[in-house]
Amino acid sequence: MRERYCAAQIRRDLARKMVFLGGARQVGKTTLAQRFIGKTGLYLNWDIAAHRERILRREWPTRAGLIVFDELHKYRGWRNYLKGLYDEHRRYYQVLVTGSARLDWYRYSGDSLQGRYHYLRMHPLSVAELGGTSTALRDLLQYGGFPEPFFGQDTVEARRWSQEYRTRLLREEITTVEGVRDLGHLELLLLRLPDLVGSPLSINGLREDLQLNHKTVSRWLDIFERFYVFFRLAPFGTPKIKAVKKEQKHYHLDWSLVRDPGARFENLVACHLRKWVDWQVDTKGRAMELRYVREVTGREVDFVILEDQRPLQFIEVKRTESPINPLLITLKRKFPSSEALQIHGEGRTAYRSPDGVQVQPAIELLKTLV
């Protein structure tokens, strides 16, 4: 396989500052980081006892080079630790920090590293990263975008990987960092969520299903999001749209968990769009967001990409060729400078409607992303 999509950017950023690379567990961060080390670099993983001792003793290489810290956010004083290393030795060492949780969130001592690092988010494999082919799209839909199950191309092993992934995430990651002890209900919540993809996520509904209080469910959802289990999209609303204000939708980084074929395809597209938006934010500083549109009447368009709070592109996702979503036509009329696009996973039909809506196969959009 070719080099991962973020490798060149990491090299450029390391020449100027530390780099924090966040992303879901087993998305490929460690494999990528170890390729940067070379003969003079050093890899230190907080989860390995011998490495942890070396970190705490501050036993750094005697030669200049790259130091990779993996899962260092589990050390409560990690930010001040890195601040001291960077301020004293920044001309001597390059520093790459990777973690399976949102490194921008775990600020136990405030943001003492302000101005000293670039933060990049690493996402699963995508159509564009795999060459932009229809075969890549088909395989991603079946196996998901995590490297091990995708390249294994084995349905049974992919299911086993997914089950083991969930167990390790709950028992080795979340309990270590967040201190959650009710693993039974936590796992029930994690199992319930994939069936709700594409619909507004109701905390009250989950609370009633699991017989838990609202505060606990809300906290656990926040934890899952911090550990890149899923991401949530807020609704987009302006005076031009009678839109809902609070109902969020969610999508899983491992979309192979989603059983409904239509919801799984929507989830795959959501991950591709979020990967592109995050890349624009992280590498170009663009003020972009991914949201969705839902009117109070219940009409909905799956996604809208915003820049500086203005809609750039409305996107409706269909598994098969279908008539144009009427709300998409309405949005194109209300926001004429924005692109309106309806994509389908099966079929080759492509045309622009008299209303200005572009209809095309999903592959045509996905291969242009990152």
Image: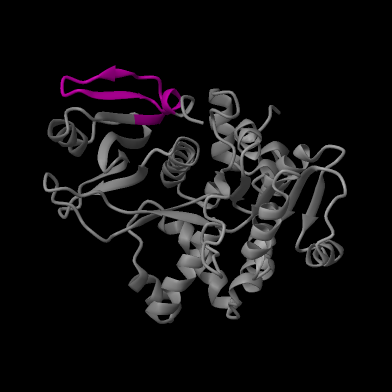
In the rendered image, residue 349 lying in the magenta stretch gets the answer: yes
20, above or below 79, in the image: above
Residue 142 at x, y percent in the picture: 57, 40
Q: Nearer the viewer, residue 266 or 46?
A: 46
Q: State how many labels appear.
A: 0
Residue 17 at x, y percent in the picture: 61, 43
Residue 255 at x, y percent in the picture: 52, 47
Magenta residues, start to end: 343-365
Where residue 40 sits, quadrant-wise, is top right
227, above or below 339, in the image: below
Left or right position of 362 against 17: left
Where residue 301 sits, quadrant-wise, is top left
In the rendered image, residue 176 lying in the magenta stretch gets the answer: no
Its colouring scheme is one colour
Where residue 13 sits, quadrant-wise, is top right
Q: Nearer the viewer, residue 276 or 110?
A: 110
Tell me which residue sits at (58%, 42%) in the image.
124
Left or right position of 321 against 176: left
Tell me which residue sits at (45%, 54%) in the image.
231
User: Which quarter of the figure is the N terminus placed in?
Assistant: top right
Residue 368 at x, y percent in the picture: 46, 25
218, above or below 58, in the image: below
Tell me which residue sits at (36%, 44%) in the image.
290
